[in-house]
Image (spheres, rainbow, N blue to C red):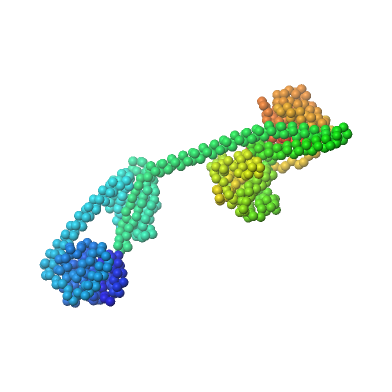
Amino acid sequence: MATILVVDDLATNRDVVSTLLGYRGHRVLEACEGNEALEVTRREHPDAIVTDVLMPGMDGYELARTLRADPATAQTALIFHSVNYDEHELESLMRTCGVNKVVSKSGDPRLLLDAVEAALAERAAAPPVLPGAEYDADHVRVVNAKLIEKIQQLSVGEARFRAMAQSSPVGIFLVQPDGDASYVSERLQTIMGLPEGALLGRGWLECCSPDLRDDLLVAVRGASSQDGERRLRVCWVRPDGQARWLNTHVRAFLDDEGGPAGAVGMVDDVTAVVEADERSRVEARRRDLDAKLRVSQRLDSLRRLAGGVAHDYNNLLAAILSFSGFVKEAIGEQLEAGRMDGDVARQSLADLDRVLQATERATGLSRQLQLFGSRAVLQPTAADLNEIIASMAEGLTDLVGSEVELDVRLHPDVRAVMADGDQVLYVLQVLISNARDAMPDGGELVIETADIHIDDARGHNELAAGEYVRLTVRDTGCGMPDDVVALAIEPFFTTKARGCGPGLGLATAYGIATQVGGDLKIESEPGVGTSVHLILPAARPDTVRVRPSDVSPCNEDGAYRVLVVDDEAALRVLVARMLRKAGYQVLVAADGQEAILLAEQHGDTIACLLTDVVMPRMLGSELAQRLIARFPGLAVVYMSGYADPMLTGQGGLGPDVTMLFKPFQRDELLAAIHTAIRVTGPT
């Protein structure tokens, strides 16, 4: 094992050579330039020295000459290890300097190891050293030739760099380790709208956000692999007033010793890209708003259609229910009187029961269509969502099934909502049923309540700003794609198999929510699950209403006169017949104008006005106002499934409005008339 001194001004080069020699078992010493190498040599007496040629301070030539001139080191094996010269260029200097071997750094590392071994064997016969003058001349000639070559290479490199920088579409600047820019390209000057002098020194920091400039200087002055690179975007206002968006990329780099060596920066004017992105975002927002508007318009059209159909349908159902009831009563009377065959009568009654059952089912569907169309009358009060959920807590497990994990998260201080509690309960049942059907193999169902504040209408179908309460039903089921979500609340749309539901559940829930000033939002992703949010307005204490108590079904003496107004002839005949049978005197009119003429003829003898809400030429509310102004003691009962003209802003009826919902049974009709006359008082 030999002791070998490695001399090189670059630490990386020293590490490579030391590692190689260490593999051969040699003891390795290091020095970064000639003077240090002399000190180590005189102290440690190495067996061989591997030295670079061109180094700051004392270079390899001077080190070789000094070593050979000292008898104590004259026989030390000496190897030139250079990347700047090859063996041919240094052949004469090898003889004049007494160098044993010359090895190129770019060659096979094994050549260096072989040269060390050979030099150690030959050190007893080191080459002679020429006299000083001849050595100096050779030294100067070789060094000058190499310097001229390097200068030419640098000139070519600088010319290429400038050509690249000037033709580059991005601006380029170079920063010194002290943080001052020493070069800025013409493209950078054009981008910034500033002359070269304004960008040199610390002027390059104008390309960066003011709050990041100190951080960038720290990164340049003390760069490391972790903090030596920054990418940022800044809006720069040029001296001519133009606002430009700049992408700035600053990368600090290290020297061979690991210290800061400066930084290079690139600035790209991306104004066109940013403006195009903004136009795309604006266009996307516009398309989104247009899509929402189209959905809203489609739903509005469907709601009007559903409400109108349900309104007319209710008149037909009312006639079917009532006349079927009349026929049933007549058959029963004939059967009791013995004027009808018993078997025929009982079969007829059974058939009528089936007609009535079908009619009641049709009434339920009509009611759902009315709710979707916001034409059904709700009875909103201050309802507590937590209490509504708690009221069905015992049946929740049975409703969702044992395969579904139920997680109920109720906000303890959630606000009361302005809604019809029974309808909210219906919506909750619909949402839970849908969630269960979406998880046939089991999953997780979450029910939660929370207060929310809405500042504007974005994403909430034009909800007014204010306080709301959100009821969320979330499942981990199959989920729905966007095109299905867009259709989910339309009436008669369903993802279930034929015969498993009419597709009115979500449509009804949507109608209930929107009629009281709320909304229904659906979020879903295939394979992930669905979240349905029922958003209801928070109630104010002064909006609480109490449901009317039950009343007796009819007036005792039936001595009062009732004015019946409806544009549906069959319904007028039906209502008049039920009232007359109960002992009331009845006047009938087909519209508001005819009703006013009858009222003028009969004056104060009319105790109650029973009017449809929606009629041609005059609404029921307008007719009532005109008659009450003429006859202040007149009682008023409205009959309709479509009460939109009568609704308040909260989706409910005014405090003095009595509404009879179509289709209705005789007892409901008589109870409403009796209550209205009793409250108002006989005329």
**Residue 334 in view:** yes
Q: Quadrant of the C terminus?
A: top right
Image location (x, y in percent) of residue 551: 78, 39
Nearest to the observer: residue 371 or residue 247: 371
Which residue: 33% across, 43% down? 239
Q: With respect to residue 472, does 681 lie above or below?
A: above
Is 509 positioned to the left or the right of 75 in the image? right
The residue drawn where x is 60% and y is 46% is 533
Residue 184: x and y in percent read 29, 49
- Expressed as whole percent of the image width and height from the top left, the position of residue 406 reads 64, 54
The quadrant of the image that shows the N terminus is bottom left
The residue at the point 62 percent across, 51 percent down is 440
Q: Where 128 sits versus 355, above or below?
A: below
Q: In this rendering, is residue 471 above or below 650?
A: below
Q: Is residue 516 visible?
A: no
Q: Is residue 620 left or right of residue 580?
A: left
Residue 515 figure quarter: top right
